[in-house]
Image (tube, rainbow, N blue to C red):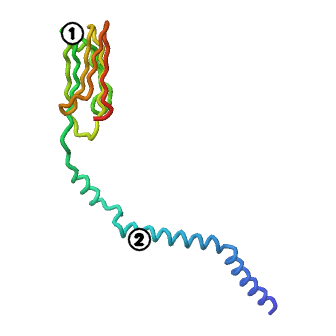
Amino acid sequence: MAVDTKDKQRKKFSISALARRFWIPLLIGAVVFVGAFTVMRVRTFFGSGDDPSLASAKVDDTKPFDPKVVVYEIYGEPGATADINYLDLDAQPQRVDGATLPWSLTLSTTAPSVFPNIVAQGNGDTITCRITVDDELKDERTSNGVNAQTFCLVKSA
């Protein structure tokens, strides 16, 4: 009988020892579970769940606004030529070699903002660049000298 009593005391001791030893991790696990459940309920209550039908409806409602029209112009002495570098509407550099002056390029976009930039060097003594956005002159510069070079820049249009 003495052996049975010791085994029972060991079992009681081991269960209570386990409870005393692991009560903090068990409490942390319970708090994490309750917190995750609360966050899930709050997110679904306010309608921020991932519903694919709502996402496609938002995209379909977008209507394009009036397009921006950007006009690059290079002027110089009649018959002169120029090497022209400009940024297209995606801000990618483009190059035109030996363009006869006057030269112009019209670009149109529905993007909310563009970054027009143009650089030109001609073989004449005078060169002028001009950037117009929606029929409004944004920048114009003239340069004089041998093989004149000029640039025009609009930070945001």
Q: Is residue 143 above or below residue 53?
A: above
- Tag 1: Cα neighbours inside 10 Å, few (<14), some, or many (≥20)? some
Q: Nearer the viewer, residue 152 or 19?
A: 152
Which residue is depicted at the point 30% across and 23% down?
Answer: 152
Return the residue at label 2: 41
Measured from the top left, where is residue 73 in percent x and y? 22, 22
Measured from the top left, where is residue 118 in percent x and y? 29, 23
Question: Is residue 56 found left or right of 21 in the rendered image?
Answer: left
Q: Nearer the viewer, residue 138 or 74?
A: 138
Identify which amino acid the numbered label 2 is placed on.
Arg
Measured from the top left, where is residue 147 in percent x and y? 31, 8
Which residue is depicted at the point 22% across and 40% down?
Answer: 110
- Image quadrant assignment for residue 53: bottom left
For the residue labelled by badge 1, is the local secondary structure a helix, a strand or a loop? loop
For the residue labelled by badge 2, is the local secondary structure a helix, a strand or a loop? helix
Per the rendering, the mark at residue 137 is none
Which residue is depicted at the point 31% across and 32% down?
Answer: 115
Work out which residue is located at the far right of the displayed protein and give it.
2
Question: Is residue 10 found left or right of 32 in the rendered image?
Answer: right
Locate the N terminus and report the quarter of the image it occupies: bottom right
Question: Is residue 34 found left or right of 8 in the rendered image?
Answer: left
- Along the polypeptide, which appears first: circle 2 or circle 1? 2
Measured from the top left, where is residue 50 in percent x and y? 35, 61
Return the residue at label 1: 77
Q: Is residue 38 above or below residue 142?
A: below
Q: Is residue 123 above or below residue 119?
A: above
Q: How many marks?
A: 2
